[in-house]
Amino acid sequence: MDIIKQKVSVGSYKAMTYRYGDGDNVIILLSGGPGLSCEYLLESHKPLAEKGFTLISWDQFGSGESEAVPSDGFYTIEHALDEMKHVVEHFHLKKFYVLGHSWGGMLGLDYCLRYPKHVEGFIAANTSFSASCLQRSCDRIRGTLDIDTQFMLMRHEAEGTLKDEEYVAVMGELKSKYVCRLPKTPDAFVRSAEGWNFDACVALGARSFATYTGSLRNYERIDQLSGMRVPTLLIQGEYDFIMPDNVALAHAHLPNSTVRIVLDCSHLPFFEDPEQYMEAIEEFLDV
């Protein structure tokens, strides 16, 4: 089975879309970053095509094979929603599932809140619906480091020297615990990172790991969850830097939601333990 690629016009530029599978039920995959290409998410979820689903995704914000976009006014949730709207219209989709990973989960929630009639079900993977809760998770992770190391990190972040060897070494250690616990980073994720639009990441999220300074630092949706009726799976790695209390907070306010914690995994459970992860996804999709 081949991936079918098509470019879709979004205003004045074109975004690259990807379609895999020929099933009647469609899942739209929303990648993280922000600004990561979608290859890692599409590659890791290909087994769902064997269960009768068609997977659709695209490279957001000029990442991957999408055309570059100007930074002014493009790196916003509103623009990402507009991209998604164009993708949905291009494929003439009326009803579908949404699976969003990390930042993609935030985008997916906003789509569900705005266009609930289109969404059959929502899978929020390794994400948070409250930036303040997410930042508390990151602060607790940094708090596990000795005070001198914490000050070293803050110094390099203030000076913008994020490629310094001592800074990179500590960040690598943290990511090996809280982003991907495999001995080797999966090739598909490495390729997605090579196509990363880092400007989008900085504008929306952060310049460095575990500190949120972009516009998503104001992302708070907990108060809007009580009115949402879209069936939702909240799935999280046990050791994700987005800690399980983010899921607990969302679940407490979100009707028709279920929670699955993927044991011994962090931020990429679909690579770290695909069998355990897919079991939860397929149970939610009832396949």
Image (cartoon, helix red, strand yellow):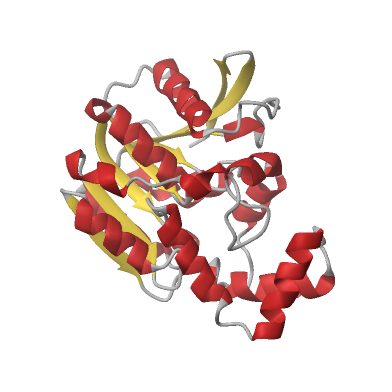
- In the image, residue 23 above or below residue 270: above
Report the residue at 61% width, 27% height from top: 74
Identify the residue at horizontal 32%, vertical 47% (top origin): 123
Q: Quadrant of residue 259?
A: bottom left
On the image, the x and y values in percent for residue 242 come to 45, 63
Q: Position of residue 125 (x, y in %)?
A: 39, 54
Quarter of the view holding residue 134:
bottom left
Between residues 76 and 223, which one lies in front from this camera angle? 223
- Percent position of residue 136, x then y: 46, 66
Q: Quadrant of residue 172?
A: bottom right
Residue drawn at point x = 34 percent, y = 67 percent: 245
Q: Is residue 165 above or below residue 195?
A: below
Question: For the point 41% across and 61% down, which residue is it?
Answer: 133
Q: From the viewer's perspective, is 132 left or right of 244? A: right
Where is residue 17 shown, x and y percent of the image?
54, 28
Q: Seen in the image, is 75 located left or right of residue 256? A: right
**Residue 97 seen:** yes
276 vs 29, nearest the viewer = 29
Please indicate, yes or no, whether residue 23 appears anywhere in the rendered image: no
Q: Work out whether 284 lies above or below 240.
A: above
How many numbered marks are there? 0
Residue found farthest to the bottom: 146
Return the residue nearer the eye: 253 or 101.
Answer: 253
Picture layout, residue 11 above or below residue 244? above
